[in-house]
Image (spheres, helix red, strand yellow):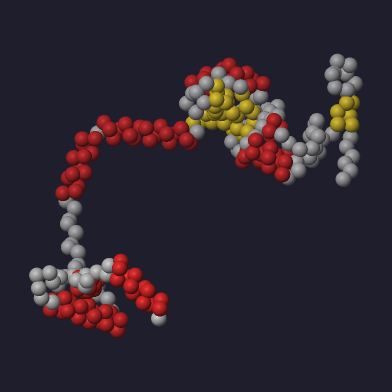
C-alpha cells in the first residue's frame, strides 16, 4: 500500500521544527515504526496477560515485541479528557505506589504517574487542561491537587468507594442498634403462624417381582432349617447360611480327626507295595 501525504515547512527561524508532515487519522502517527493495528493488538495482549506471558504469546505469533515494549505506557495527550478518573495502584504493595489516569468515557488509560502525591497530580493537571469532571477516591492528596490546579472541575466519587462507604455505614448502624433489632425480630417471630404438620407418607415398598419373591422364600427356608437344629452348640435362628455350612464342615473334620494316624513305617510299606505293583 502506498500513501502520499503533504509536507509543510515553517518560515520562522526561531522554530525548532523545519518541516511538518501531514498525518492520516487512524492510519499513521509520528515516529511510528509499526501499524496502528499492530499497536492495538500488542496493547490488548499486555492488558490481558501482562509482560512475561504476553512476550511468550507474541513469540509464538512471530511478533517482535518484548515485555518492555508491551508494558510501555501510552503517550499522554496534550489535553486532558473531559471526564478524568484518577486512582492509586501499587508498584510494590505496602511500599511504592503510583497514580493511574483514565479516560472514563473512552475506557482507556491516559497516563501513569510515578507517585500519588498532590504535587505530581497538580503539575499534570496544569500541563494538560480540559478536565471538566474528575472521578476520584477519598484520598486527601487528590483533593488538594484539584483545589490547586483545577478548582472549576466537578469532583465525583467513584462507584466502588460509594458502595464501600455505604456498606461500612450500614454495618456501623446495625452494630449500634443491635439490641433494638434483635427485640424487633423476636416480636415478629412470635406473630408468625406455625406451619401445618407434615403429611406422613407410607414407607416405600419395592415392587413384588419374581426374583424378590424367590429370594424371600429361600431366606424363609434357611431360617426354618436353622431353627430346626437342636443341641447346645446349635447356631441361633439369626445365623446366616454361611454359619450353617461352616458348622457342618467343622463336624466333618471332627469325625475324620478320630481316625488312626499313619506312621512313617506304614507310609514306607505302602509306597514299596505300590512300586512293586
Image x and y of residue 30, in percent: 80, 31
Is 37 positioned to the left or the right of 109 in the image? right
Image x and y of residue 128, in percent: 66, 24
Above or below residue 189? Residue 236 is below
Above or below residue 272? Residue 18 is above
Q: Is residue 49 visible?
A: yes
Q: Nearer the viewer, residue 129 or 159?
A: 159
Q: Residue at x 52, y 26 (%)?
A: 93
Image x and y of residue 126, in percent: 64, 20
How many marks the image carries: the answer is: 0
Is 170 positioned to the left or the right of 31 in the image? left
Q: Is residue 74 visible?
A: no
Q: Nearer the viewer, residue 88 or 176?
A: 88
Q: Residue at x 26, y 31 (%)?
A: 176
Quadrant in the picture for residue 269: bottom left
Q: Residue at x 18, y 40 (%)?
A: 183
Q: Residue at x 69, y 30 (%)?
A: 68
Above or below residue 196? Residue 143 is above
Q: Nearer the viewer, residue 226 or 248?
A: 248
Query: In the rendered image, which quarter contains the C terminus?
Result: bottom left
Query: In the rendered image, which quarter contains the N terminus?
Result: top right
Residue that extends furthest to the bottom in the rendered view of this protein: 210
Quadrant in the picture for residue 15: top right
Image x and y of residue 65, in percent: 73, 36
Is 255 positioned to the left or the right of 15 in the image? left
Q: Nearer the viewer, residue 262 or 165?
A: 262
Amino acid at each position: 500500500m502506498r500513501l502520499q501525504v503533504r509536507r509543510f515547512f515553517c518560515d520562522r527561524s526561531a522554530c525548532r521544527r523545519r518541516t511538518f508532515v501531514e498525518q492520516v487519522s487512524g492510519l499513521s502517527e509520528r515516529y511510528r515504526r509499526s501499524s496502528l493495528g499492530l499497536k492495538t493488538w500488542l496493547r490488548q495482549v499486555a492488558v490481558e496477560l501482562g509482560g512475561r506471558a504476553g512476550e511468550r504469546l507474541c513469540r509464538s505469533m512471530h511478533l517482535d515485541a518484548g515485555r518492555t515494549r508491551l508494558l510501555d505506557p501510552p503517550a499522554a495527550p496534550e489535553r486532558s479528557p473531559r471526564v478524568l478518573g484518577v486512582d492509586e495502584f501499587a508498584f510494590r504493595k505496602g511500599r511504592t505506589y503510583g497514580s493511574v489516569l483514565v479516560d472514563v468515557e473512552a475506557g482507556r488509560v491516559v497516563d501513569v504517574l510515578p507517585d500519588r502525591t498532590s504535587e505530581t497530580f497538580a503539575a499534570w493537571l496544569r500541563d494538560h487542561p480540559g478536565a471538566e469532571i474528575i472521578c476520584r477516591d477519598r484520598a486527601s492528596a487528590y483533593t488538594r491537587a484539584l483545589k490547586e490546579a483545577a478548582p472549576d472541575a466537578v469532583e465525583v466519587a467513584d462507584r466502588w468507594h460509594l458502595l464501600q462507604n455505604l456498606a461500612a455505614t450500614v454495618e456501623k448502624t446495625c452494630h449500634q442498634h443491635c439490641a433494638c433489632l434483635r427485640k424487633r425480630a423476636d416480636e415478629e417471630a412470635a406473630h408468625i403462624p406455625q406451619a401445618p404438620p407434615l403429611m406422613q407418607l407410607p414407607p416405600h415398598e419395592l415392587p413384588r417381582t419374581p426374583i424378590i419373591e424367590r429370594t424371600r422364600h429361600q431366606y424363609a427356608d434357611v431360617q426354618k432349617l436353622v431353627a430346626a437344629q437342636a443341641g447346645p452348640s446349635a447356631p441361633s435362628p439369626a445365623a446366616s447360611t454361611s454359619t450353617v455350612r461352616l458348622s457342618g464342615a467343622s463336624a466333618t473334620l471332627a469325625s475324620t480327626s478320630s481316625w488312626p494316624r499313619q506312621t512313617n513305617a506304614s507310609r514306607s510299606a505302602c509306597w514299596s507295595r505300590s512300586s512293586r505293583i
